[in-house]
Image: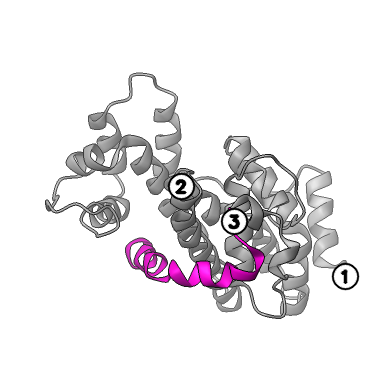
Amino acid sequence: MKPLAADIMHAVESNNLSLPTLPEVALRIRQCEHDPNLDILTLTRVIEHDPATTAQILRIANSPLVRREVKVADLSKAIGLLGMNYCARVAISLSTRQLFNSKKPSSEEKMREIWQHSLDVACHCYVLASKAKLVPEEAFLAGLLHKIGTLPIIAIADKKDCYSLIELNKTIDEIHPMLGENILNHWQFPRSIADIPQNYLDHSRYINKIDLCDLVTLANNKIISDEQRLPWNDIVAVERMGWNSDTVEDEFYHLTAEIELAHHVFEC
């Protein structure tokens, strides 16, 4: 039997790899974004078709995360308060949770692990974005989608019982960046998002100014295990963040409360 990686690459090369599709609410929002006449009422009608996403946006609008004192009970008012771009990005981000599911118990556990890691990275990115003068909701989306390439790998592994967990993990490490870029291009995300799966592990990547990928790189390196973590002085994104490699852990420590708040608000 061919290894899992070989099976996937064969499917890619023969154009037979089934890529995941965006959830319905996310697809509708993406379509709306191209409408120059998009207004709050139209976006409200799209989002309210998904009760879970609606509840989540109301929860955000009433949380300390946005520091508002007036309680909001109406989705259109929440969108008016938070902004259409903010709500659109958050709705797309949170709707992807439903993609991280599997009918096999062993794979379902792996899906939960990847989702929790992605959510953790996303919450770190959300907080880091304001410090880096980037857009928090864009950073959150970038963090959630950086390992989206794991989905077709697990889907193929689910079809057969001959792949071990060790082989699955090895294949995810090797191939998820390439598949992630393919998926995000298929979903027509901008390059600032679509390039991240391929680039977030390039710790010596050279650019002039900090970007979303840098935030994912920093967040991921903070979250992964000690055995996997690179020394901070090997990661050039640290300097672009305006930090000193010797004090990165202190910088993250000072952000702990904000990151925990983001987790509390965005958990779904």
Please report whichever mark, 2 or 3, sits nearer to the chain's N-terminal start.
2
Q: Which residue is mark 2?
A: 23
Q: Nearer the viewer, residue 18 or 192?
A: 192
Q: Amino acid at mark 2?
A: Pro
* Other-residue count near label 3 (Cα within 10 Å), few / some / many at <14 / 14–19 / ≥20: many
Determine whether, in the image, residue 264 is placed left or right of residue 155.
left
Q: How many marks?
A: 3
Q: Is residue 263 magenta?
A: yes
Residue labelled with disc 3 = 216
Residue drawn where x is 31% and y is 42% of the image: 47
Which is nearer the N-term, disc 1 or disc 3?
Answer: 1
The residue that disc 1 covers is 1
- Marks 2 and 1 sit apart, C-alpha to C-alpha, by 34 Å
Local crowd size for mark 2, using a 10 Å CA cut-off: few (<14), some (14–19), many (≥20) = some
Residue 44 image label: none
Residue that appears at 33% across and 24% down: 38
Tell us which disc is closer to us: 2 or 1: 2
User: With respect to residue 46, does 32 lie above or below?
Assistant: above
Q: Which residues are magenta?
A: 242-268
Task: Tell me the quadrant of the picture where the C terminus can be found.
Answer: bottom left
The residue closer to the viewer here, 95 or 222, is 222
- Left or right: 223, with 262 as reference point: right
Q: Position of residue 110 (x, y in %)?
A: 59, 73
